[in-house]
Image: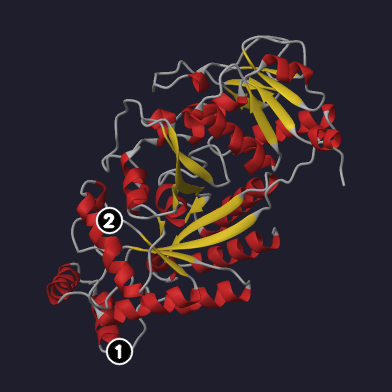
Amino acid sequence: MASVSSLNDAMLLIYSPAVTTRIKYIFNLFFPELLGLNYKLTSLTDEFMSYPGAKINYSQSDLGSGLYIKSAGILFENAIIYQNIETIDVNGSPVFFADTDSSSILPFDPFAAAFYLVTRYEEYLSFKPDKYDRFEVSDSIAYKGKFLQTPVVNKWAIQLKEILHYHYPDLIFHSPVYCFIPTIDIDHAFAYKYRKIYRVLGSYCRSVLNRDWKDILLRTEVLLGRQQDPYDNYCYLENIHQSYHLKTLYFVLFADYGGDDNNVTIRKKGFQKLLRELDGQSTIGIHPSLSSTKHFSKLNTEIYHLAKVLHRDITISRQHFLKIKFPKTYRNLIEMGITDDYSMGYASVSGFRAGIVNPFFFFDLVKNNVTSLRVHPVSVMDVTLHDYYHFNPDKAIETILHTIKVVKSVDGEFISIWHNESLSDKGRWQGWRKVYEEMVKSAVYNM
């Protein structure tokens, strides 16, 4: 059995003049979650000074004992206050909340900087929303500081690990293991099937006006059962995922038709049968409609109806159009029993919205507390590469493979977003099945 002293030596002691909710939150993220390291917090100077093992002094003053990291102050606050942030480059790495105190082991406060990013602090402040009432990526500190494609929080944690290991080689780290989670959004379960008659007739009329005879022919063949619906790619997906022993997450838009929420009719038996089949092989989650972000009753209805179809509780979610309003969106999901959300990304630009590629708990800045909702950052999305970047398949593959390499380098969680319709390999998505297959193969072989 290990002695008491050796057990103490293997635990990190952190001194802070005050142990706040924010400090406990971010230290839990850094040490147990990202570094797999046991630690203890103390606000007692005598306990810190007499401790013989590994220790960090996180305060405004160097105590002359342990490793000193000068605090920036944000973790000792309770309010949401505008922060005057300037990103600087230190040895090729972007940092902020910098300080010139030479006695500090780092030239910036990694805990304050990480807290600002993962809590999405800037999205609580005043900003000009886009047409979908979303936070614009161009307003983010990561975009302005040109580190959106870098998981800086992970890199800061690794940097701290290297310093700790150098000074305290007896410390034991259990870092997370890289993994790949393929996720599919079902915005339009079928291109032609299971739609109300007025929508079918309206589509025929548009095709006639546009002289789109191919669409008229294909639609007719599908509705007569002579051809497979072009969006019906579920067997293709399941075959790929099963061949690599992957568990897939599907997020289904299960809302009444209207505006940008225009999936097939949710009451159609064929649609419901498809969802039950997919849920038996993989896992189905809710894809809340855009209108549900404004009306909680709609979110309630959508989750209730999907749960009724699947005969189980719904616990995972991804926002339609990746629309998140802090803290309202996540509070609503928590109230509805959602435990894990997969919306943390931008639609228009690839990158890491929260500066991290590992899951973390949502911290409600208004209430100043940690919640039970686990947030899973998104790594790459098909629509971003095709519609916003206008990449061809080869360029998309190149970009995805680079992203996988970045996530793998920090032992992150690579989460891809694709849509069943983008795997039709027809029309504007011609050649994109090859992209998906290359992504899956590379993501798995890196595991």
- Residue 221 at what x, y percent from top left? 28, 86
Image depth: mark 1 or mark 2 in front: 2
Q: Along the horizontal axis of the image, is 220 left or right of 57?
A: left
Is 107 situated above or below 123? above
Q: Nearer the viewer, residue 76 or 153?
A: 76
Q: How is the image coloured?
A: secondary structure
Give residue 198's mark.
Answer: none
Is residue 260 something that shows in the picture?
no
Residue pictured at 59% horizontal, 61% vertical: 439
Identify the image quadrant of the C terminus: bottom right
Disc 1 is placed on an element classified as loop
Give residue 225's mark.
Answer: 1
- Residue 270 at what x, y percent from top left? 30, 82
Give residue 289's mark.
Answer: 2
Residue 309, located in which quarter of the rendered image?
A: bottom left
Residue pictured at 69% horizontal, 43% vertical: 36
